[in-house]
């Protein structure tokens, strides 16, 4: 699933390409844009599943995390 912010992130990458911002300047610009987008977005929601198996004194544990997006 593509979140609703997908076109904005592509636009952000296009600006970086067109203006030839490179290196540390590009990293700072991208950080600021992503932080702004995160401030405007709803918090992500998700769930975690933990499975623990004990067979013949062998213990196996698995943790699965899934993030869901609300659009």
Image (spheres, grey):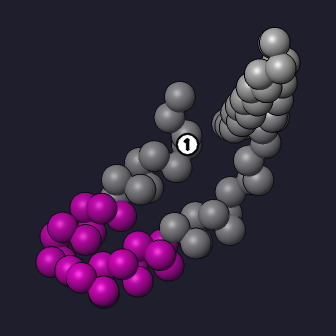
Q: Is residue 26 above or below residue 1?
A: below
Instruction: State yes or no: residue 9 in magenta.
Output: no
Give percent across and percent down for residue 42: 75, 53
Q: Residue furthest bottom?
A: 25
Q: Nearer the viewer, residue 27 or 5?
A: 27
Give the residue number, with chain letter if any, for mark 1: 4
Magenta highlight range: 12-33
In the rendered view, does 34 fall on the left or right side of 38?
left
Is 31 colored magenta in this rendering? Answer: yes
The picture places residue 65, in percent across and down from the top left corner, at: 71, 36
Camera-side residue of 47 and 30: 47
* Residue 51 visible in the shown view: no
**Farthest residue in the front direction?**
57
Closer to the camera in the image, 17 or 51: 51
Location of residue 45 (image quadrant)? top right
Left or right of residue 13, residue 70 in this image: right
Crowd band around label 1 with a 10 angstrom C-alpha radius: few (<14), some (14–19), many (20+): few
| Percent coordinates x, y for residue 40 in the rendering | 67, 63
Q: Is residue 48 visible?
A: yes
Which residue is depicted at the point 55% across and 40% down?
A: 3
| Residue located at (81% from left, 12% from top) | 56
Residue 23 in which image quadrant: bottom left
**Residue visible at 44% across and 55% down?**
8
Where, quadrant-wise, is the C terminus in this rendering? top right
Q: Position of residue 19 (x, y in %)?
A: 18, 77
């Amino acid at each position: 699933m593509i979140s609703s912010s997908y076109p904005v992130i592509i636009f952000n990458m296009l600006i970086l390409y067109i203006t030839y911002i490179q290196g540390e300047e590009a990293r700072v610009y991208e950080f600021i844009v992503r932080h702004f987008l995160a401030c405007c977005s709803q918090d992500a929601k998700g769930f975690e599943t933990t499975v623990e198996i004990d067979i013949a004194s062998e213990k196996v544990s698995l943790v699965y995390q899934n993030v869901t997006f609300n659009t």
